[in-house]
Amino acid sequence: MSGVSRTPADLPGSGRTAVVTGASSGIGAATAERLAAEGFDVVLGARRLDRLTALADRIGGRALPLDVTDADSVAAFVAELDQVDVLVNNAGGAFDAKPVADADLDSWARAFDVNVLGSVRLTKALLPLLRASGAGDVLFVGSTAGMVSYEGGASYTAAKHGVHTLAGTLRLELVAEPIRVIEIAPGMVRTDEFAVNRTGSEEAAAAVYRGVREPLVAEDVADCIAWTLTRPHHVNVDLLVVRPRAQAAQHKVHREG
């Protein structure tokens, strides 16, 4: 259906193809599942093809290997696609919690490569198909860390600030085109891997959420993503900030006990 103009009546999902990166776990996996339930044809991209394939088989999606930090992998992924209506730039992560004085520059480079440059690589490569869709969406999974700074978070907050300004700049550049640019900025989300990758241990990761009643989970963020993507296409949700009720701000979290 490339090149065919969509109308609001065609939304939300039926007949639309959504690409979700980082879809093998966490928010990406939950988003792929939710969009499939909304009627989208979902293409799942991630490095761990075994997990990706199992999820794709379960939800009726299509699994393709994808490393957003590798230009050749991105090119091979895009070559498999002939229609894309939605791109969910979800692949990302935090890889340390060190102060700037002890900065691990390899960790900084990794954070920028996957969060910022990875999103740029895939967005740039898929823009022709998104334009051809007649009603395209580029959605960035950012973070409240992209709007504030805090001790020990510089590599991640700097990267997510980059994602935030990338979304804002792209929206300005595409304002005359039939493409929405959406940013979802979650606060505290408890997933299986994020805090472990950042802190390096299960014990340290558990401490991040200790005493917090009902932190967000991946399905909560997927619900927000699905809602923004299924609005009539003249409605652009520029930025949706979502936190658990127990988190009033990045530095203000109520912990029980």
Image (spheres, rainbow, N blue to C red):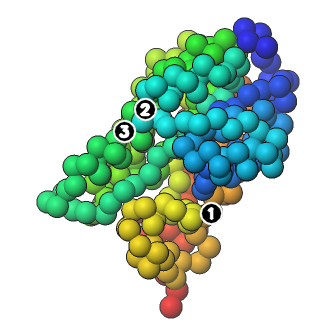
Is residue 124 or residue 201 the one in the foreground?
Answer: 201
Tell how many labels.
3
Instruction: Using residue 121 as the reference point, say whether residue 229 is left or right of it.
Output: right
Foreground: disc 2 or disc 3: 2
Query: Please, what secondary structure does the residue beneath circle 3 have?
Result: helix
Q: Is residue 253 above or below residue 171?
A: below
Q: Which of 190 and 202 is in front in this view?
A: 202
Q: Which mark is residue 217?
A: 1
Relative to 93, is 181 above or below? above
Q: What element carries label 1?
A: strand
Q: Distance between the residues labelled 2 and 3?
A: 9 Å
Q: In this rendering, would 160 be left or right of 214? A: left
Q: Position of residue 112 (x, y in %)?
A: 34, 41
Q: To which residue does mark 2 refer? A: 70
Mark 3 or mark 1: whose residue is earlier in sequence: 3
Tell me: residue 99, above or below residue 168: below
Whole-Å distance between the Cαs marked 3 and 1? 25 Å
Q: Mark 3 points at which residue?
A: 113
Does residue 132 appear anywhere in the picture? yes
Q: Which residue lies furthest to the left in this view?
A: 101
The residue depicted at 61 percent of the width and 31 percent of the height is 87
- Kindly identify the residue that appears in the image at 51 percent across and 27 percent down: 74
Q: Which amino acid, by three-letter code, is at mark 3?
A: Asp
Could you classify mark 1 by the number of other residues whose Cα lies within 10 Å: few (under 14), some (14-19), or many (20 or more)?
some
Q: State whether residue 221 appears in this view.
A: no
Secondary element at image label 2: loop
- Res 215 quadrant in image: bottom right
Mark with earlier residue (1, 2): 2
Q: Which of 65 and 15 is in front in this view?
A: 65
**Closer mark to the observer between disc 1 and disc 2:** 2
Q: Quick one: label 2 or label 3, which is nearer the N terminus?
A: 2
The disc label shown at residue 90, or none: none
